[in-house]
Image (spheres, rainbow, N blue to C red):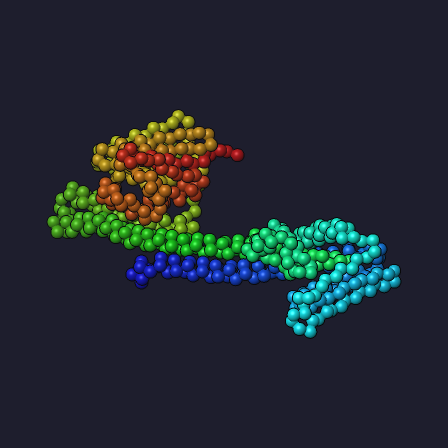
Amino acid sequence: MKWFTNKYAYLLAILAMLFCITLQIVWLIQLFGAQQVQVKRDLDQAVSNAACVSDYMSVAQGHEKSENFRNFFLSPEWLQIKQSFTRLRERHVGGSFSSQITPDSTFLSIGFNIANNKAGHKNRRIKHIYDQGETLESIMTADKRDLKRMDSLVKTECLKAQLNMETYHILYNYDSGKPESKADWEKTKKADYQNQLYGYNLNFFLHTYQLVVPSIKSVVYYRMRYYLLSSFSMLILTGLAFIFLFRMIHTQRMYTQARIAFTGNMTHELKTPVSVIEAALDAVSRYQLYREPEKLENYLAISKSELHRLTLMIDKVLQLDQLDHGEIKLRKELYDVQQGLEGVVSSMRFRNEQGAKIVYIPVDEPCFVDGDPIHLINVFYNLTDNALKYSGAEATIKITLKNTGDKVIISFNDNGPGINNIYQKRIFERYFRISDNPNIHNVKGSGLGLDYVKRIIEQHGGRIYLLSEPGKGSNFVIELPAYHEL
């Protein structure tokens, strides 16, 4: 399983991400195509509605209050009839259209001229019959006016459908079907959309109207914005999930390795006092030291010291386990930190066998906190013992105390090898020990002390942090809330 994980885990994650990305891309492409079709349908509907309204407005003067009149010319059925009449030119079918509007009724006459053979349409003559008093000039002026109205209606319908995009129109000669502007017609070949031709005036037929949209992509992307956002969010969350998963696996692996190292190291630590006690008791029995009281007392003292050391190590493990399960309940009381530090310094000086120097700098004002004396003393012992162990034979430990009014600040400064910045955030992790420094690696320890220290200080509402540079020693600083009477 280890071989499989190390060799294929990242490959499987990459393949899974590529598969997710591919699925999202395929889905978005299909959605983009569907949205393009829908936008074109909406444009068709917008131009169709505008053409209906323009036709109605061209003949509505004096009949605005006629409901039947309005409903007929605004109906899709009428538009369909009119468009069919217009498109019959493509089949070479001639036609005639006339209208007569009276106060009572409206008469529409639509006629078709179908040639009996294919050549008939070439000789077809187009006739325009205008009402009396109308000239070609007046009709052209009216056509320009109606074209502006059609443009305005198209823009209004597009805005209603939320189709805000760049557009232009092309006019075609109604009789010949040829575009009025060949340059504009050439541009339509590259356009994303052009609709069928529509007339815009029922009184005369000079031009047909076509809306052209160079690009509809902006509207399509706008309509897809929530889909795009959800898709990208899902990919980002999936990627973050994989990253988190691998970091968790990596952390768990490091934690497992640290526990294995801790087990080996702790086994050695526990074996040492047991071996010393076993040797001492064996010597008492083998050499009958009960006859030599002084030697017997010395061996018993050694055994007692080692038993005490063994008890402390076991207690340290049990305390951390209790902290994890929330079983340790602090028994807080008014506690003088200065008095506690003096006792720890005196004891460590007495136990120090390497000739290290411990300097304690007290303050004049009292330093009271609301704390558990037993656990705080254990914290002070841990930090002082670490400073002695890792600073070498010529260690100088400087312990200072300061009261700022709101906080009591305790500093444990040593002249050891220091700690690299990359390890300073992890130094308080359980089982963590710096492995690339031989001076530290050769010092036996369990990797539990600083984790215990941090947890106890935090349970007291304080904090602990490290100030250190390689080659310049380390300074562990504790900040505890000062005691104030209510």
Quarter of the image where one finds residue 174 = bottom right
Which residue shows up at 12% across the image and 51% down it? 286
**Is 220 situated left or right of 49 in this image?**
left
Image coordinates for residue 51, horizontal then vertical, percent: 71, 58
**Is 12 situated left or right of 196 in this image?**
left
Which residue shows up at 78% across the image and 52% down it? 135
Quarter of the image where one finds residue 400 = top left
For residue 104, say whether it is visible.
Answer: yes
Which residue shows up at 39% across the image and 60% down it? 15
Question: Which part of the image, by quadrant, shows the N terminus?
Answer: bottom left
Q: Nearer the viewer, residue 473 or 339?
A: 473
Q: Nearer the viewer, residue 66 or 139?
A: 139
User: Which residue ends up furthest to the right in the rendered image?
Assistant: 104
Which residue shows up at 47% across the image and 32% down it? 406
Quarter of the image where one finds residue 424 = top left
**Please, is residue 154 above or below residue 106 in the view?**
above
Q: Nearer the viewer, residue 163 or 432?
A: 163
User: Which residue ends up furthest to the left in the rendered image?
Assistant: 287
Image coordinates for residue 481, horizontal then vertical, percent: 45, 36
**Is 8 situated left or right of 190 in this image?**
left
Image coordinates for residue 394, horizontal then vertical, percent: 22, 33
